[in-house]
Image (tube, rainbow, N blue to C red):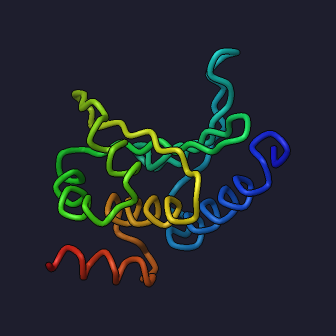
Amino acid sequence: MAQWIGARNAKRWVELTTFINTVYPGAFRSEWLFGGSQHGWSLRFKASKSFCTLIPERSRLLVVLVFGTAERAKVEPILSSLVTHVRDDYEQSTTYHDGKWVLINVDSMAVLQDVKRLLELKRKPKMVTSLTRLARSDSER
């Protein structure tokens, strides 16, 4: 897979999956899903509902996050502090009956940090991280 998505993206993949498994120990089961020849494979982290989905594409890594109404209320106050294309991805995403589906191209470490912040807003971590403290201070402003 590292050859498929590239070395930098493979590093981000490992960092993100390690983050999820460390900050949310035992909270999610991961499952590989095959979306057919047109969409390929994805790795979904799920409890009762989807937490996030990682999509390995040729030379890139995508993450899908679905935000419900309560989650959007937590995300929108920090939008101005996110990397420009993450903010744009969020704002341009369509809101459906089951939430706002946001597709993010994780093309830098800064974007990866934003994805981690969004995950921590989506679900409170079992383990407090420096990102959690940063997110809390942002929401208090």
Residue 124, x across and y down, in percent: 34, 69
Judge from the rendering whether residue 60 lies leftward or rightward of residue 67; answer left or right.
right
Vertical relation: 94 (above or below) 139: above
Q: How many marks?
A: 0
Residue positioned 25% across, 58% down in the render: 75
Placement of 128 over or under 40, stated as above or below: below
Residue 71: percent from the left, percent from the top?
Answer: 24, 53
Q: Nearer the viewer, residue 17 or 7?
A: 7
31 or 119, nearer to the observer = 119
> Farthest residue in the top direction?
37
Looking at the picture, how far across and down is residue 79, in whole percent? 26, 58
Q: Residue at x 41, y 72 (%)?
A: 125
Residue drawn at point x = 66 percent, y = 42 percent: 60
Residue 109 picture location, percent across and down = 57, 65
Residue 97 located left or right of residue 84: left
Name the foreground residue: 109 vs 66.
109
Quadrant where the N terminus sits is top right
Quadrant of the snapshot with the C terminus: bottom left
The residue located at (27%, 30%) in the rendering is: 94
Q: Is residue 40 left or right of residue 44?
A: right
Query: Does 88 appear above or below 117?
Result: above
Is 3 left or right of 141, judged from the image as shown?
right
